[in-house]
Amino acid sequence: MKTQHPRYILLILFASFGIAKAQTDLDGLMMSKKNLCGGFLYGHSQWKNYWEGTFYRDNANLGTVSSQSVTAMANYGITNKWNILAMAPWVKTQASAGTLIGQQGIQDLSLVLKNEFWGHQFGNVNVTTLGLVGGSIPLRNYVADFLPLAIGMRSKTVFGRLMADAQIGHWYATASGTYMARSMVTIDRNSYYTTELIQSNQVSMPNVWMYNLRLGWRMGADVVAEMVFDRMNTLGGFDMRKNDMPFLSNNMEATRIGVNFKVPVPKTNGMSIMASAMQTIAGRNMGKSTAIMAGVVYQAAFLSKEAAK
């Protein structure tokens, strides 16, 4: 039987590249009032080896499993302290060997409300704390029970996040912790096996805990260079069985490291280029993936006639 393994969950990936001028849901920056930033990001991730439970192995039947994505994103400053962010990816998956056919299509819409609720200057150290709430809903009825080639999990989610950012001059550190709740998923079969036979088409999804640490150098929101460490694990689930397919409610863990960069495009008055690279270094029921992302965003201010003058 073919052994397969899910790529790193796109629902979590979308939040892991906090480099755009748009100020993302994982950085300590805020979009100014009545400013809108939007753009498109291209992503590519792939893996050949994976963890079957905690056992590290490969699978010649699948070869290299890869996914590509094009993500539309936007961030609007409601006020200087309140931002709303939206993101939706189109995803394509494939395997380099075997007979399984990859999937493609629009995935989930994610919405996030971000608030900077406290800030203070301690000598030359500026500290801010932020809170975020958000969630995601599937945009179409794609097939979720087809890992590792499904484009997503098709679970509705809600999450809460607390974040702290400290900056000295241009150097900074940002830390955050996130709890995500996931809804049940309906699959196209009437029974499945976890650690026991379940006669149902409803899959109970374990919730997820994540934390993220960023260390880097930034010049306002225009130039960013940072190192990233993140960790996710599901709060429950079960291990893949030997030579079995993965399943939606597996116990998934992943530890990743990476770098993010962002620079403005000269003489464009608002356009920025960004790039990221992330590597999974440890996991459980998870592919050892390498992921890259690059994109272009543009920021515009909606000013009143009086302010424009």
Image: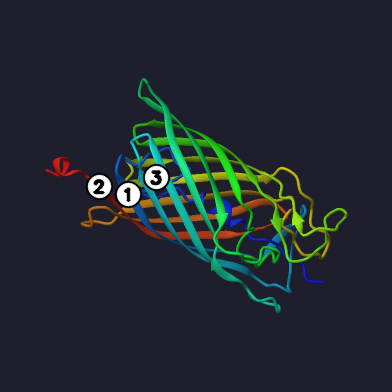
Mark 3 or mark 1, which is nearer the start of the sequence?
A: 3
- The color scheme shown is rainbow
Q: Residue at x 21, y 44 (%)?
A: 303
Mark 2 or mark 3, which is nearer the start of the sequence?
A: 3
Residue type marked 3: Gln
Residue 302's disc number: 2
Would you say 212 lies left or right of 246 here? left
Q: Is residue 183 above or below residue 100?
A: above
Task: Determine crowd level at label 3: few under 14, some 14-19, many 20+ residues with C-alpha closer than 10 A.
Answer: many
Q: Secondary structure at mark 1?
A: strand
Q: Position of residue 224 (x, y in %)?
A: 37, 46
Task: Determine crowd level at label 1: few under 14, some 14-19, many 20+ residues with C-alpha closer than 10 A.
Answer: many
Residue type marked 1: Leu
Q: Position of residue 165 (x, y in %)?
A: 45, 33
Q: Nearer the viewer, residue 147 or 127?
A: 147
Q: Are marks 1 and 3 in contact (CB under 8 Å)?
A: no
Find disc 1 in the rendering and name its residue: 36
Residue 23's disc number: 3
Residue type marked 2: Phe
Q: Position of residue 191 (x, y in %)?
A: 83, 62
Image quarter of residue 155 = bottom right
Q: Residue at x 66, y 66 (%)?
A: 143
Q: Which quadrant would the N terminus be assigned to in this image?
A: bottom right
Q: Secondary structure at mark 2?
A: loop
Q: Residue at x 50, y 61 (%)?
A: 89
Q: Is residue 268 above or below residue 101?
A: above
Image quarter of residue 285 = bottom right
Would you say 134 lies left or right of 248 here? left
Q: Position of residue 46 (x, y in %)?
A: 59, 65
Q: Are marks 1 and 2 in contact (CB under 8 Å)?
A: yes
Q: Is residue 43 above or below residue 126?
A: below
